[in-house]
Amino acid sequence: MVPNLRFSYKGDWSKRKLNEICQFFKGNGLSKSDLSNEGFPCILYGELYTTYKNEVISDIISKTNTTLSNPFLSRNNDLIIPGSGEDPIDIAVARAIYQNDIILGGDLNILRPKSNVSAAFLSYQLNGVRRYDIAKKAQGKSIVHLHNSDLKEVLVSIPSYEEQLHIVKLLTKIDEMIEIQSKIIDRLYSQIKYIKGQILNMTTITETKPLGQLCNISTGKRDANEMKSNGSYKFFTCSKDDYCIDTYSFDGEALIISGNGELGLIKYYNGKFDAYQRTYVLQNFKCHPKYLMYILQNKLPKKIEKEKNVGAMPYIVLKTLTSINIDILNMHDQIKIVNILNKFEEKLENDRILLELFEKEKSFLLKNLFV
């Protein structure tokens, strides 16, 4: 009864039911319509999916002026778990609160740990190695429910209080790093978007041509007679990239545009790759391909919104792409713009990789710091 990774502590962890180490309560009242810009801080059950991503809630976002006859107020070291949702895994999330007198809305299961049990420690454990244990307790089909009576039987592993706090300190620090890195990425993305707009609008346009005259546009295939079987090249669909066996193959410098799924998603790729139907492949350029990509990133969303075909899944047709007017600069200015924006996008990609490493580190620790 010891974890794979451990600080310098001795002794086994003990298995306990949540009912043995926590008191159970339910939140009371409140809905989205009760929220306001001012008033008392509050938490709604739906915010555990959308707003509060970390195991420990540090800043309370929502407020309410609604007067409840019997509000349920938080205490320092409370743990909250949503009581309903659309998917068992979605509602199997726990969040610790270290503030008093926060109004906790209806459909919230509230666990109040007894002495020498950290709510944050339980939160990290329940969201990690115990998440599927909670999900299995959820009941229902279109809407699933999770009751206090279900949670009471969930088993958790408990070490000494000092070891709990040591684990929480480490994981909280990683959460802080993830949050800071996410903010860096968001700000950098906004900067890149602004700079793109400024650079592309301040230059002198040499000519304007429809996209169909600046490159060849092909599509991936679904027909089995047109597929090639290789399984070794990069694979592009309308919404993701992966590896696949039966697809239509391309080679060389290209822009790949999704024609449905994530409509208008644009990727640059250079090499051998495969593409599925409704994935448009632009090649044989008469301008710099990355300059063209930046122009399309600005223009394509508006064009799609105006001319997309709506069916079971919205899609764009070839005619929509070929008719987009592209403002062309001389090649020297195109290269200059591409070099500037490449520097920013390299920085953005490096920051994304760093964020992914932090998230992988946290996932690894959640699996190995607990029994």
Image: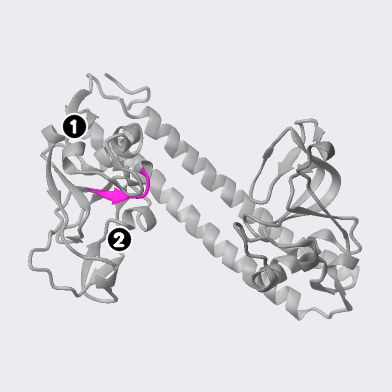
User: Which amino acid, mark 2?
Assistant: Asp
Q: Residue 247's image quarter?
A: top right
Asked if the residues shown at circle 2 and circle 1 are in contact, with their CB atoms under 8 angstroms apart, the answer is no
Please, which residue is most extreme toward the left here?
69
Residue count near mark 1 (Cα–Cα under 10 Å), binned few <14, some 14–19, many ≥20? some
Horizontally, is 253 left or right of 317 in the view?
Answer: right
Q: Nearer the viewer, mark 2 or mark 1?
A: 1
Quadrant of image for the N terminus: top left
Magenta residues: mostly which secondary structure?
Answer: strand
Please name the residue shown 22% across and 66% down the image: 41
Number of numbered discs present?
A: 2
**Which residue range is magenta in the image?**
80-87
Kind of element beneath mark 2? loop
Q: Toward the viewer: 28 or 206?
A: 28
Residue ID for mark 2: 59
Q: Is residue 346 shown above or below 146? A: below
Decide whether residue 366 is among the magenta residues: no
Residue ID for mark 1: 153
C-alpha span from label 2 to label 1: 31 Å
Q: Is residue 329 shown above or below 120? A: below
Horizontally, is 299 left or right of 119 in the view?
Answer: right
